[in-house]
Image: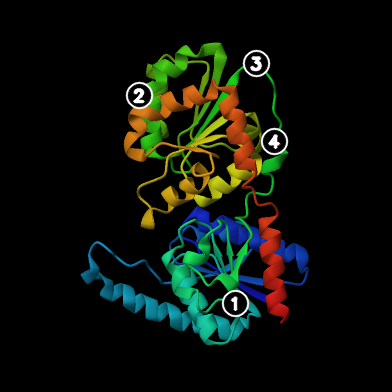
Amino acid sequence: MNYLISGGGTGGHIFPAVSIANALRELDKDANILFVGALGRMEMERVPQAGYDIIGLPVRGFNRAQPWKNFSVMFDLVRSMLKARKIIRDFRPDVGVGVGGYASGAAMKVAAWMGVPIVLQEQNGFAGVTNKLLRNDATKICVAYEGMERFFPKEKIILTGNPVRQNLTTGKRTEDGRKHLLIIGGSLGARTINEAVIAALPELAKEGEKMQVVWQTGKIYYDRCRKAWEEAGRPANIECLDFLSDMPDRYAQADLVISRAGASSISELCLLGKPAVLVPSPNVAEDHQTHNAMALVNKDAAVLVRDADASKELVAKACEIIKDDQKLASLRTNILKLAQKDSARRIAEEVIKIGKK
């Protein structure tokens, strides 16, 4: 069968899309898979690196702050839909998979118009605009959170969770008598989290042999953070890194994780049962990350520190929790209950089932 997968714009969309493609290829050895993305966006580089073909559309997001600038955006949308029509005519997909993002909206809408059944994958606890616009066209909608019937028709929803990196569970932990704090800023970094850590470097350094800190700053903020670490005397119990290439081992070693509340990050924390302090980014559409975080907080499965409060509260709260074995155990037990396993495979099975029909 032929599978058309569309979406992207951020790693949170691209990674699940590639994971679904990998699962489709495992289940259907003769699968033909084609991606459709947005020109100039991250997927145009990442998808070929994963071994898949991709075609880019000249689609862009709407400017909500300056609506009068959207004439050219509409023009590009029309161009994108015409190009999507040609792609679908040539590739003849048996089923389409949309994971959110600008390109997904154009490609999946045209696919539905042309009679191709489509499956949507919604990563967040608050549905994205693209998937909400496509909900009536979808055959099935795979979600990561309960209660999504407020956005989608109940009969179409399947609770599958979000696909996570497939090697994450292979990490090894080494017992050394210390608590381990993992601070994740993402590939580019999170300014608020980094600034909070910079301000607290003297306090973290005082923990010495009691606590080891792994501080992943992201590429954008690495130079500033590294300079601050050096000015603090290069404390031996704090590693300052721009990127972590050994995430399975880093996760395995961590007693507590500080992280943004992106959908992929939360799914990884749930699967691995990692206690977490979540700092939702205020710079995402419709405040998705706060909704993601609250789904855990409401079940006592994580602790939330708001971005605006992080400079004063974040590190102090993390240090308080990591020293409280009872709190750590409670968070670990509750977050494990929310884990959805084999998400990519479950989504792929549904896609294949619909394609065969």
Label 1 with label 4: CB-CB less than 8 Å: no
What's the distance in space between the residues labelled 3 and 4, CA to CA? 18 Å
Three-letter code for the amino acid on which mark 3 is drawn? Gly
Residue position marked by numbered label 4 in the rendering? 171
Q: What's the CA distance linking mark 4 and mark 2?
A: 31 Å
Q: Mark 2 or 3 closer to N-term? A: 3
Bin the neighbour count of mark 1 within 10 Å (Cα to Cα): few under 14, some 14-19, many 20 and up.
some
Q: Amino acid at mark 2?
A: Ala
Residue 97 appears in the picture as rendered: no
Element assignment for label 2? helix
Residues at marks 1 and 4, CA–CA distance in whole angstroms:
37 Å
**Label 3: which residue?**
177
Percent x, y for residue 22?
69, 60
Disc number for residue 163 = none
Determine the CA span between mark 1 and mark 3: 52 Å
Query: Between disc 1 and disc 2, whose residue precedes?
Result: 1
Q: Secondary structure at mark 1?
A: loop
Considering the numbered disc 3 on the image, is that residue within a helix, a strand or a loop? loop
Q: Which residue is mark 1?
A: 139
- The tag on residue 199 is 2
Image quarter hosting the C terminus:
bottom right
Task: Give the mark nearer the N terminus: 3 vs 4.
Answer: 4
Q: Residue 245, image x and y in percent?
A: 60, 38
Q: Residue drawn 46% across and 46% down?
A: 294
Horizontal arrangement in the rendering, residue 267 relative to residue 41 (left or right): right
Task: Please report contact status of discs 1 and 2: CB closer than 8 Å, yes or no.
Answer: no
